[in-house]
Amino acid sequence: MRILKNLMNFFFFAVVVALVLFFLVPQVEKELPQGVFYKKDVPLPTNLHPTVEKRKEQLVEKVREAGINIVITEGHRSVQRQDKLYEQGRSSEGQVVTYARGGESYHNYGLAIDFALENEGGRIIWDTEYDGNGNGRSDWLEIAEAAKGLGFEWGGDWENFKDYPHLQMDFGLSIRELKRGKRPKVDEYADEE
């Protein structure tokens, strides 16, 4: 009788431990470059989030109406492209342009865009003081202001690393949450104008 009672206690304990492990430990995970892990049943996006796409188009239209020639230089970015950009200024030539490895950028989740300006001669420039529309204000800062009005966060407002061409919408999600498989809803903010 005592052996049966011990077996039942052991079985109950094993079931409880199994349930705790199943519900509390993340369902892991497929490894990608640089040791970045992703929940296997939540694929990485391959395009901009629909809300980010819509806001990007609204931004371009709004600043063009103000006489500013904006160029969207990048949107969604693959993990491999992010790693290549991360290597720039480190293991390859050029200036450091990012501190985010693959999987650590909002670009990798379709939640960020980068922009530049096109000057009167048709050249793409990253001059934050350029006033192409001649209104006495920096076109760059006018774009940042318009973007923030559409719900973007501007990298130029960051404390540590100023990323002036960068705009993102994080939908309240951290990179860690995105890496663990959380995604913003597709219809989130979709009806706002």
Image (spheres, grey):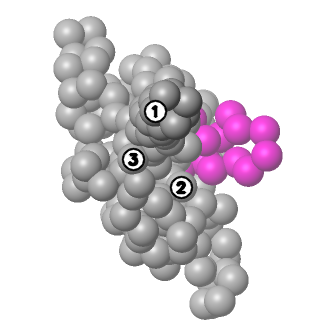
Q: Position of residue 191 (x, y in %)?
A: 20, 10
Q: Whole-Å distance between the Cαs marked 3 and 1?
A: 34 Å
Dot placed on the residue nearer the N-terminal end, 2 or 1: 1
Main secondary structure of the magenta stretch: loop
- Quadrant location, the C terminus: top left
Q: Secondary structure at mark 2?
A: loop
Give the label, 3 or 1, closer to the camera: 1
Is 191 left or right of 56, judged from the image as shown? left
Q: Secondary structure at mark 1?
A: helix
Give the label, 2 or 3, closer to the camera: 3
Dot placed on the residue nearer the N-terminal end, 3 or 1: 1
Q: Residue at x 69, y 83 (%)?
A: 90
Is 75 left or right of 86, judged from the image as shown? left
Marking on residue 4:
1
Marking on residue 27:
3
| Residue of label 2 | 104
Q: Looking at the picture, which amino acid does disc 2 mark?
A: Glu
Residue 105 appears in view: yes
> Of 164 and 62, which appears nearest the observer?
164
Q: Position of residue 138 (x, y in %)?
A: 59, 37
Q: Secondary structure at mark 3?
A: loop
Q: Position of residue 161 (x, y in %)?
A: 73, 50
> Of 59 and 169, which appears nearest the observer?
169
Marking on residue 23:
none
Residue segment shown in magenta: 154-165
